[in-house]
Amino acid sequence: MTVNLGRVKKLEVVAKIEKEFMNDVLISAEDYLKRAKSEPVVLHEGFSNSPTT
């Protein structure tokens, strides 16, 4: 890691308060659940239609 330190030109640190961080985590989890909602049906249909041994 120290080998590349000489090539670093700019280091930007972004900080959030706990409330902002938790809000972002919850929004991310909600988005994930919305996208994943239909996946169990697709998985079930895949196993039912072409089971493997």
Image: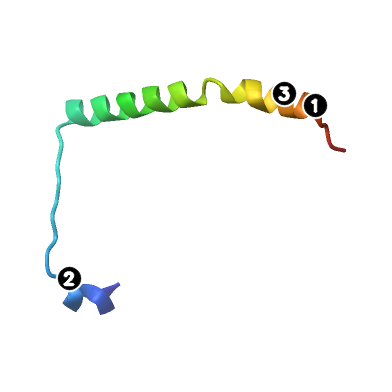
Numbered disc 1: secondary structure: helix
Q: Are marks 3 and 2 in contact (CB under 8 Å)?
A: no
**Left/right of residue 3 with respect to residue 53 in the rendered view:** left
Quadrant of image for the C terminus: top right
CA gap, disc 3 and disc 2: 50 Å
Residue 36: horizontal and vertical position, in percent?
A: 51, 26
Quadrant of image for the N terminus: bottom left
**Left/right of residue 30 with respect to residue 3 in the rendered view:** right
Front in this rendered view, residue 40 or 49: 49
Q: Residues within 10 Å of mark 2 (few under 14, many from 20)?
A: few
Residue visible at 14% across and 60% down in the picture: 11
Front in this rendered view, residue 23 or 34: 34
The residue that disc 3 covers is 45
**Quadrant position of residue 16:** top left
Q: Are marks 1 and 3 in contact (CB under 8 Å)?
A: yes
Q: Amino acid at mark 3?
A: Glu
Numbered disc 2: secondary structure: loop
The residue that disc 2 covers is 8
In this view, the residue farthest toward the front is 49
Tell me the colour scheme of the image. rainbow
CA gap, disc 1 and disc 2: 54 Å
Q: Residues within 10 Å of mark 3 (few under 14, many from 20)?
A: few
Front in this rendered view, residue 20 or 43: 43
The residue that disc 1 covers is 49
Q: Amino acid at mark 1?
A: Asn
CA gap, disc 1 and disc 3: 6 Å
Residue visible at 64% across and 20% down in the picture: 41
User: Which disc is residue 39 wearing?
Assistant: none
**Quadrant position of residue 4:** bottom left
